[in-house]
Image (cartoon, grey):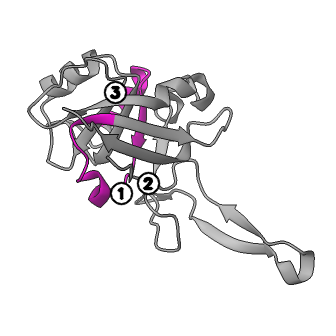
Amino acid sequence: MDWIDLTRPMDETLTVYAEPGYSDPPFSVAPWCDIAGQGYAVQRLALGTQCGTHIDAPAHMAEGGATLEALPVSALVGRYVTLRRGEVPQRGAATILFVDGTVGPITRAGFDAALALGFPVWVMAGGLQVAGERPLFLHRALARAGVYLVEDLDESAAAHLPDRGEIIALPLRLVGTGGSPRRVLARGDVLR
């Protein structure tokens, strides 16, 4: 099966997180130098650590939480299993939990059962909410549990992902940050 790119494109149409009184840094790409003047072209990027498809380290939502470099690269490449509303998957050989957050909220008991599976990395399509909890409850609960969250995927691409397979979710190698933009690729199992 071919790899599916779950990464949102980063261009002038990219929106960043904003709420009343706050906005993440805007994304921009601007020329720095060009081939005619310098002999090569370089662009300058401006963005926040939670820009586009990104990972949240626990330090993003939990005071004293682990920063990005504490997670080994091996935790970001491996087998995934999908959590859908109303079902808690069997972990099996999976090392990463893929969360289908496009189908509506899950119960608190369902969230607690998924958290108890012990996945160090959750990759989430959509904005999964826990029924009856505040909007950022899931993010804060994962951070307090030491879980890294990959989010803001290309939901149209994620809709084609089978329930099990392989995933690669590598960030920039930033040190001391609560997150980083990243590229996320996945493919379902060829044999079931």
- Identify the mark at residue 154; answer none if there is no mark: 1
For label 3, the SS is helix
Residue ranking furthest to the left: 86
For label 1, the SS is loop
The residues tagged by marks 3 and 1 sit, at their Cα atoms, a distance apart of: 24 Å
- Identify the mark at residue 7; answer none if there is no mark: 2
Can residue 123 be found in the magenta stretch? no
Question: Label 2 is placed on what type of residue?
Answer: Thr
Q: Is residue 178 above or below residue 4?
A: above
Q: Quadrant of residue 180?
A: top right
**Is residue 5 left or right of 130 when viewed as pictured?**
right
Which residue occupies the foreground of this view, 162 or 113?
Answer: 162
For label 2, the SS is loop
Q: Is residue 170 above or below residue 64?
A: below
Q: Residue at x 34, y 43 (%)?
A: 187
First in sequence: mark 3 or mark 2? Answer: 2
Which label sits in the foreground, 3 or 1? 1
The residues tagged by marks 1 and 2 sit, at their Cα atoms, a distance apart of: 5 Å
The range drawn in magenta is: 137-165
Q: Residue at x 33, y 16 (%)?
A: 118
For label 1, the crowd category at 10 Å Cα-Cα, with few meaning under 14, some 14 to 19 and many 20 or more, is some
